[in-house]
């Protein structure tokens, strides 16, 4: 009998270390003997992506292509359907642990709070492209960083400003709306939050991982 898989999502604004935590969790679950699949929405950062999702990601991330929030929602939804149908859902059916950097909460934060789309509209559209299992992961943990200068430093270290993507390069007021959106989602959906900056130091990836494991164990 195949055990039901676990779908674990790490969320948060750009520069909070989501991909790092997914990699650390992948190592942890592998050591526990689990089959692990990692994905990064929309369609990147993993061998488990699909050609269609990867291609859509290049369009989504291209800051030179001007488009409105509804187009962004459509692009994300198409990439999301690809990953769900061809990577995430089959892995869960086989009993794997699926670790995702982002899911539709990112669209609620970025296109909803950031770009002004109606949240219920985003939820309904996402449900049409996926299903109820996608909409209700086993665990969602939101990473926050209440130090904007540190977040920008991390983004700059990862990529020079000429290569920031369509959302990383948006102005500070947009980033603040996104951050406020994540705070609202955590409150309204009763989602756990891990702050990446302690009062007296920057938390190490291992410290953050330990907090995440306490939540999902």
Image (spheres, helix red, strand yellow):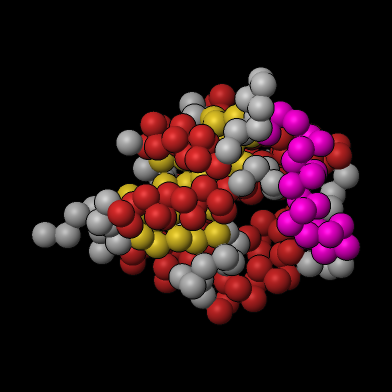
Front in this rendered view, residue 206 or 109: 206
- Left/right placement of residue 162 relative to residue 38 reads right
Q: Give me the residue at 82% from left, 64% from top.
A: 163
**Which quadrant is home to the N terminus?**
bottom left
Residue 18 appears at what percent x and percent y? 58, 48
Q: Is residue 110 above or below residue 203?
A: below
Regarding residue 81, the answer to whether it shows in the image is no
Q: Give me the residue at 84% from left, 59% from top.
A: 160
Regarding residue 48, the answer to whether it shows in the image is yes
- Left/right placement of residue 6 relative to residue 43 reads left
Corner quadrant of residue 139? top left
Q: Give me the residue at 79% from left, 67% from top.
A: 62
- Left/right placement of residue 212 relative to residue 51 reads left
Looking at the rendered structure, the number of numbered marks drawn on it comes to 0
Residue 154 appears at what percent x and percent y? 74, 47
Front in this rendered view, residue 94 or 149: 149
Q: Is residue 191 above or below residue 16?
A: above
Residue 9 appears at what percent x and percent y? 47, 47
- Judged from this view, the residue extending furthest toward the top is 199
Residue 13 appears at what percent x and percent y? 67, 43
- Judged from this view, the residue extending furthest toward the left is 1
Q: Give me the residue at 60% from left, 30% from top.
A: 195
Q: Is residue 164 magenta?
A: yes
**Which quadrant is home to the C terminus?**
top left
The residue stretch that appears in magenta: 145-167
- Left/right placement of residue 176 relative to residue 127 reads right
Q: Is residue 134 above or below residue 208?
A: below
């Amino acid at each position: 009998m195949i055990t039901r898989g676990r779908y674990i999502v790490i969320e948060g604004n750009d520069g909070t270390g989501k991909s790092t935590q997914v990699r650390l969790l992948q190592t942890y679950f592998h050591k526990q003997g689990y089959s692990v699949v990692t994905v990064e929405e929309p369609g990147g950062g993993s061998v488990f992506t699909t050609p269609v999702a990867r291609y859509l990601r290049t369009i989504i991330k291209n800051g030179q292509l001007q488009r409105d929030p509804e187009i962004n929602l459509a692009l994300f939804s198409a990439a999301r359907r690809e990953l769900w149908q061809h990577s995430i859902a089959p892995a869960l059916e086989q009993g794997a642990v699926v670790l995702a950097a982002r899911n539709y909460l990112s669209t609620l934060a970025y296109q909803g709070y950031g770009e002004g789309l109606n949240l219920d509209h985003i939820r309904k559209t996402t449900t049409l492209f996926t299903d109820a299992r996608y909409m209700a992961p086993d665990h969602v943990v939101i990473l926050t960083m209440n130090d904007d200068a540190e977040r920008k430093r991390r983004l700059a270290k990862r990529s020079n400003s000429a290569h920031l993507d369509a959302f990383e390069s948006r102005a500070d007021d947009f980033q603040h709306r996104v951050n406020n959106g994540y705070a609202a989602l955590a409150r309204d959906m009763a989602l756990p939050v891990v702050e990446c900056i302690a009062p007296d130091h920057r938390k190490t990836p291992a410290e953050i991982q330990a907090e995440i494991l306490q939540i999902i164990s």
